[in-house]
Image: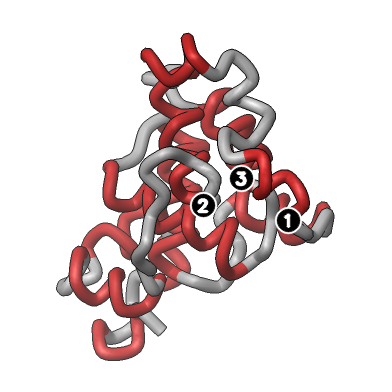
Amino acid sequence: YWQLHMFPDMPSRCMRAHYEGMQWTTDAAKLRAWQRGNTGYPLVDAGMRELWLTGWMHQNVRMVTAMFLIEYLGINWTEGLKWYHDTLVDADLAINSMMWQNAGGSGLDQWNFQLHPVQHSKFCDPTGAYVRKWIPELARLPTEYLHQ
């Protein structure tokens, strides 16, 4: 909360000013596919569908979906922050702003790691139960192909 106090523009502006010049895509179709869980990456899609239907998702999945939006789709972290704020039942402006800033590289504790959507899916959902629950059209797919 101290970060939001010290940086009141944190929900919309980079805390590290030199990141303001980052080039982002404004592809509305990609953003909409992410929001609705139609990216083609099972863990990302399962998480986003869970979020849309329940207003919640596990922290690990939040991090994977955030990194996917920023690193794979090249969409500004502020779009993710806005979507999470509108859909999460536990939305917290200070915490969400801080985490999205960190995911986008402009926060005080920027993430220096990657969460590959396929590899992380195999790691955190080895049986595929989570993906099958939220993506019923993949429910009959053998586990060896589920995370692809």
Which amino acid is tagged 2? Answer: Gly
The image quadrant of residue 96 is top left
- Circles 1 and 3: CB atoms closer than 8 Å: no
Mark 1 and mark 3: Cα distance apart in space: 11 Å
Q: Position of residue 33 (x, y in %)?
A: 67, 57
Q: Secondary structure at mark 2?
A: loop
Nearer to us of marks 3 and 2 is: 2
- Please name the residue shown 40% across and 71% down the image: 117
Q: Secondary structure at mark 1?
A: loop
Residue under label 1, please give it: 22
Which of the labelled discs sits on residue 77, or is there none? Answer: 3
- Circles 1 and 2: CB atoms closer than 8 Å: yes
Residue under label 2, please give it: 105
Most foreground residue, 15 or 12:
15
Which amino acid is tagged 3? Answer: Trp
Which amino acid is tagged 1? Answer: Met
Is 97 drawn above or below residue 57 in the view shown?
A: above
- Circles 3 and 2: CB atoms closer than 8 Å: no
Q: Is residue 97 left or right of residue 144?
A: right
Q: Can you say which quadrant of the picture contains the C terminus?
A: bottom left
